[in-house]
Amino acid sequence: MEIGIIKRGAIGDVVRTTSILHPLKKKFPDSKICWITDSSAIPMIEHHPLVDEIQPFGDQSKLRDLEFDLLISLDDEEEACKLASKITSKKLVGAYMDQERRSYTDSKWFDMGLISKYGKSKADELKAKNTKNFHEHMHEMLGLDSEICRPTIKIPAKDMNFAYDFAYEHDLHPDDIIVGINTGAGGRWPLKKWGEDQTIELIDMLIEDGLKVILFGGPEEKERNANIVRCSSEKLIDAGNNNSLLEFAALINLCSVLVTSDSLALHLGVATGKHIVALFGPTSSTEIHLFGRGIKIAPQMECLCCYLKKECGVAPNCMDSISVDSVYEATHKAVEDAKKDHCF
């Protein structure tokens, strides 16, 4: 059986979508899975043992010649919907183009999205009232009846060796309880970041407690992280901002605990089995599944899950309303849970 998956990005969404691979293979044991994605996201799936083929979302003429028994279309952007409609498939599940209009097969997941048949206002209302995580929605939409699986990635040896060299350089050992901090949010969703001052205060408190702390961030957090390093304890370890995706994943894998905003780091932390303290504000905490290894923190505000990207008239905003003490306490709870992993 030939199965096609269209899932381009964001990269963190590609990572969490890997959770459907094991259930699909269980339901269709003789299947071959082809994943169509953006070139930037390929490193997250190119080494995955359950992905048989990867096609970059680029040469549309080549992609239109593909044929599948089942096509799973999970992106609602117009170009992805057009492609889903042009690819030959015996069965299509997800988003597609209905003449000149984006549409989708029966799905409560897309009911809450930008192409909802109910319109944006009702879609936002449904999203705010949603009680199911992303994986539950995927299982329902795809008719998967097996147990929900944790997202997974395969980190190649060369990237793991990069992380081991980093650990050696910074005197990090396998028995250490290492806390990763990733409170930025990149340029697309700046309102998801937690404040610099709060981050600095938390880092200093954790280091004072004797914990080893690594600061993470991507290229868009370079200036922010430089300021955090400058104002924090000299014992703070800076992971840098120019690591490749797989190097970034390998460095996160060094950690026992990860304190993170709703970002790529969160999804990588879930995929690598870290104990997570996840901070939420403008995006839905309900949609995120931590698989029994995490704590979600969000302030008590009626305007949460607004999905605003760049402007907010509330002061302090939702993320800045998350107290340092609440994150500190949750981090120590995660540390205690992580210590149990070290007891054999």
Image: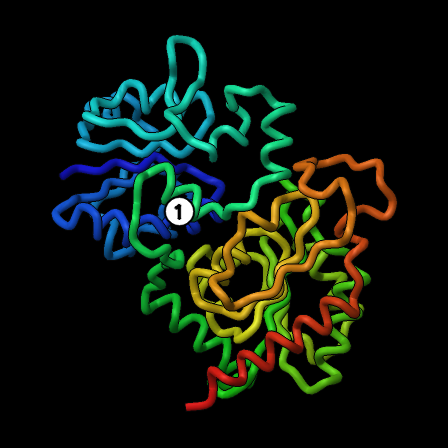
Which residue in the rendered view is the most extreme toward the right? 315
In the image: residue 217, left or right of residue 55: right
Up the image or down, 62 lies above or below 3; here it is above
Residue 25: horizontal and vertical position, in percent? 22, 50
Specify whether 43 is left or right of 341.
Answer: left
Task: Estimate how packed mark 1 is, as few (under 14), some (14 to 19) or many (20 or more) residues with alpha carbons within 10 Å.
Answer: many
Specify the farthest residue to the top.
Answer: 99
How many numbered tags mark residues here?
1
Is 2 above or below relative to 249? above
Which residue occupies 22% across, 43% down?
Answer: 33
Q: What's the coloring here?
A: rainbow
95, above or below 25, in the image: above
Q: From this viewpoint, is residue 248 visible?
A: no
Which quadrant holds the C terminus?
A: bottom left
Q: For this view, does 77 lie left or right of residue 279?
A: left
Residue ID at (12%, 47%): 30
What element does badge 1 sit on? helix
Q: Which of 208 and 297 is in front in this view?
A: 297
Residue 327 found in image quarter:
bottom right
Residue at the spot x=19%, y=25% of the render? 90
The picture places residue 107, in percent across and down from the top left corner, at: 42, 31
Residue, disc 1: 17
Q: Is residue 136 left or right of residue 231?
A: left
- Does the rendering let one see residue 3? yes
Position of the N terminus by quadrant: top left
Judged from this view, the residue extending furthest toward the bottom is 344
What x and y, as percent, mark residue 121? 65, 24
Q: Which residue is drawn at 37% across and 37% down?
A: 141
Question: Given the image, on which type of amino acid does mark 1 rest?
Answer: Thr
Return the x and y of residue 96 as percentages of the image width and height.
37, 22
Residue 334 vs residue 77, the one in the foreground: 334
